Image (cartoon, rainbow, N blue to C red):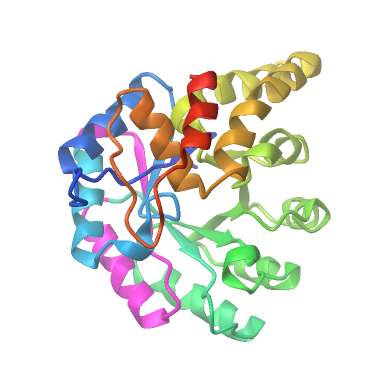
């Protein structure tokens, strides 16, 4: 529904830590025009959603959508409160979002019944299609296979951003439902694609979006060796951005090195270390 290569976009800030809406529009346009991405996901983990206000989230959605026109813009709306998530979903729809990214409620560790009820209520609350965000390493709660099978019957639950790192469970849900599975782990884009995934919601796509697209094109054309070669060529960038320090920290450092709008991160995140910056300079 949303294309193959989506980027989990950072939220640019000014040097003083304020919202940089002009920078957000410039970065969004760059990602669409130069990196050839199909869509943007704003107000997610990489967008530092835990440290932006609801009003700022609304401003980011509106500004980015204005900048990229017909390109899909999805809004992260997940919180650990069903009521608050519903409010953010309605706000996203009002400000022009094309879809929602809804993370599993975190910290409180609800039962699977609670998880299912949460997602259904959120999906019922707006007219927007929703991707579920399954990332138990952050939330503490996985969306279990049987829960996903039931949720797939909801007409507005259209896919999953998959960070569970359980390809067997993922393969089962792909085989038994029509859900679109997007890899949220950059190192697993090609493996998940090869078992029926549709693409990625990527962090490293900020700087290698066109290369990710070329990798998926090669696979679609039946050139598995070329797809593998491109996958392996991406590993140094993935390693630097996704394993050294938090992804938002690393990718903002990379964007700043490239002269693209990003700015600092907001506390409690700390800026990139000199060691990471040196590693990124060697890559870019």
- In the image, 51 versus 161, the foreground residue is 51
Where 234 sits versus 10, above or below? above
As drawn, is 176 to the left or to the right of 143? right
Where 270 sits versus 151, above or below? above
- In the image, 15 versus 58, the foreground residue is 15
Q: Residue furthest right?
A: 168
- In the image, 243 versus 126, the foreground residue is 243
Region rendered in magenta = 67-96
Q: Position of residue 67 (x, y in %)?
A: 21, 34
Q: Residue at x 32, y 63 (%)?
A: 51
Where 51 sits versus 4, above or below? below
Q: Residue furthest front?
A: 274
**Number of numbered discs overlaid on the protein picture:** 0
Q: Position of residue 209 (x, y in %)?
A: 50, 26
Q: Residue at x 37, y 73 (%)?
A: 85
Question: Which image quadrant is residue 66 in?
Answer: top left
As drawn, is 264 to the left or to the right of 181? left
Q: Is residue 243 visible?
A: yes
Q: Is residue 3 visible?
A: no
Q: Position of residue 27 (x, y in %)?
A: 29, 32
Q: Position of residue 180 (x, y in %)?
A: 60, 48
Question: Which image quadrant is residue 185 in?
Answer: top right
Magenta stretch encompasses residue 261: no
Magenta stretch encompasses residue 78: yes
């Amino acid at each position: 529904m949303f294309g193959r290569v989506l980027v989990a976009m950072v939220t640019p800030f000014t040097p003083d830590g304020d919202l940089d809406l002009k920078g957000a529009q410039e970065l969004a346009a760059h990602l669409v025009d130069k990196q050839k991405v199909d869509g943007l996901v704003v107000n997610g983990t990489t967008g530092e959603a835990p440290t932006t206000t609801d009003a700022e989230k609304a401003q980011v959605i509106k500004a980015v959508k204005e900048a990229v026109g017909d390109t899909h813009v999805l809004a992260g709306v997940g919180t650990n409160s069903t009521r608050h998530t519903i409010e953010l979903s309605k706000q996203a729809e009002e400000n022009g979002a094309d879809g929602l990214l809804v993370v599993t409620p975190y910290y409180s560790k609800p039962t699977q019944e609670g998880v299912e009820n949460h997602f259904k209520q959120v999906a019922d609350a707006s007219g927007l299609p929703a991707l579920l965000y399954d990332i138990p390493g952050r939330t503490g709660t996985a969306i279990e296979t049987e829960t996903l099978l039931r949720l797939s019957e909801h007409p507005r639950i259209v896919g999953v951003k998959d960070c569970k790192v359980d390809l067997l469970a993922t393969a089962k849900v792909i085989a038994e439902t029509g859900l679109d599975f997007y890899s949220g782990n950059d190192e697993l884009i090609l493996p998940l694609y090869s078992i029926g995934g549709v693409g990625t919601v990527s962090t490293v796509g900020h700087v290698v979006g066109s290369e990710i697209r070329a990798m998926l094109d090669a696979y679609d054309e039946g050139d598995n060796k070329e797809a593998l070669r491109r996958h392996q060529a991406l590993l140094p960038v993935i390693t630097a951005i996704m394993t050294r320090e938090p992804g938002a920290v690393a990718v903002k450092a990379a964007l700043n090195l490239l002269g693209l709008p990003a700015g600092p991160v907001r506390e409690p995140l700390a800026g990139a270390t000199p060691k990471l910056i040196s590693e990124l300079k060697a890559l870019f």
